[in-house]
Amino acid sequence: DQQVKQNSPSLSVQEGRISILNCDYTNSMFDYFLWYKKYPAEGPTFLISISSIKDKNEDGRFTVFLNKSAKHLSLHIVPSQPGDSAVYFCAASGGGSNYKLTFGKGTLLTVNP
Amino acid sequence: DTGVSQDPRHKITKRGQNVTFRCDPISEHNRLYWYRQTLGQGPEFLTYFQNEAQLEKSRLLSDRFSAERPKGSFSTLEIQRTEQGDSAMYLCASSLGGNSKGGYTFGSGTRLTVV
C-alpha cells in the first residue's frame, strides 16, 4: 500500500509563475517530511524538509507547507525557473531525518520558458 | 569530498548470474542506506547501516540479496541468481547520524539490467 502518494504524475508551469506540488500520506507515525529533486541519470538531491512540529519551512524560492490534520504537504516554488524542471519526490520518515524514508512516485515538473 | 560514489554505473547481466555493487559514502557519514528504484516508482528502502552494523532490512531484501559494510566505510550489495525482476536502479545514500535538518546524500546509482 502506498503510504506516501503524489497523485499528479506531471505538472507544467510557465517560467516566473508558482509551481505547487502536492503530497498526501496515510501513516500518522511519520514525523519528518522531505522533498527531493531528481534529474535524469542522477541520484535524488535533497531540497527541503519539515518536521511534524512545524507547519511551514522556507528556503529561498522553496517553501514546504504541512497540514497534519489533513495528512497533506505541498511544495511551492516561486518563481519557477526552467532549471527547476525535474522529477520531485516527496518522502516521509517515522524516525527523524536520518532513518529510512518512504517515497512517493514522484511528479515531473516542466517549467516552460 | 566527492559525494557518494557508486560503481559500476551500469551493469547488464544474464539471468542467474551473481552481481555485486559498491558504494563509497561521504567519509564522515556514519549511516549508509541502499534503495531500489524501478520505472515510474519512487525509491524503495532496502537496508541501512550505522557504521558496520546492519540495523534494518526491508522485506524486499530477499535471501538472494546481501549487503555488507566492513569496517564501517564502503558497502557492497550482492544479488545472487539474478532474475529479470531485479532490473532496477540501485541507489546508495549516506548521512550523519542524529536528527539533522538535511536529508541523505544520494549517489548517482547503479542501473542493473537482467537479460
Image (cartoon, rainbow, N blue to C red):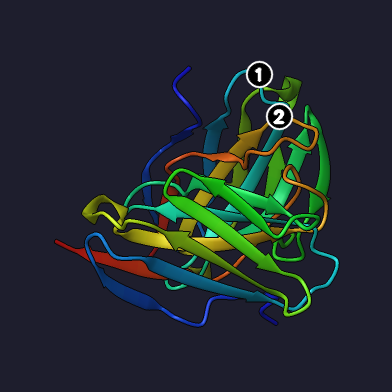
Q: In which quarter of the image is the N terminus of chain A?
A: bottom right
Residue B12 lies, in percent from the top left, at: 36, 53
Label 2: chain letter: B
Q: Mark 1 points at which residue?
A: B28
Identified at 72% across, 50% down, the residue is: B47
Identified at 44% across, 35% down, the residue is: B7
Identified at 36% across, 69% down, the residue is: A108
Q: Is residue B94 or residue A69 the one in the foreground?
A: A69
The quarter of the displayed image where residue B14 is located: bottom left
Q: Is residue B65 or residue B3 the one in the foreground?
A: B3
- What is the three-letter code of the residue carrying label 2? Leu
Q: Is residue B79 visible?
A: no
B62 lies left or right of B56? left
The quarter of the displayed image where residue A25 is located: bottom right
Is disc 2 in contact with disc 1, using a CB cutoff of under 8 Å?
yes
Measure the alpha-carbon separation of dots 2 and 1: 7 Å
A76 lies left or right of B62? left
B108 lies left or right of B18? left
Query: Helix or strand or loop: what does disc 1 sit on?
Result: loop
Label 1: chain letter: B
A70 lies left or right of A61? right
Whether B20 is drawn above or below B53: the answer is: below
Q: Mark 2 points at which residue?
A: B96
Which label sits on residue A57? none
Q: Quadrant of the C terminus of chain A?
A: bottom left
Residue B2 lies, in percent from the top left, at: 44, 21
Pointer 1: residues within 10 angstroms few (<14), some, or many (20+)?
Answer: few
- What is the three-letter code of the residue carrying label 1? Glu
Q: Which residue lies furthest to the left in this view?
A: A113
Residue B11 lies, in percent from the top left, at: 38, 48
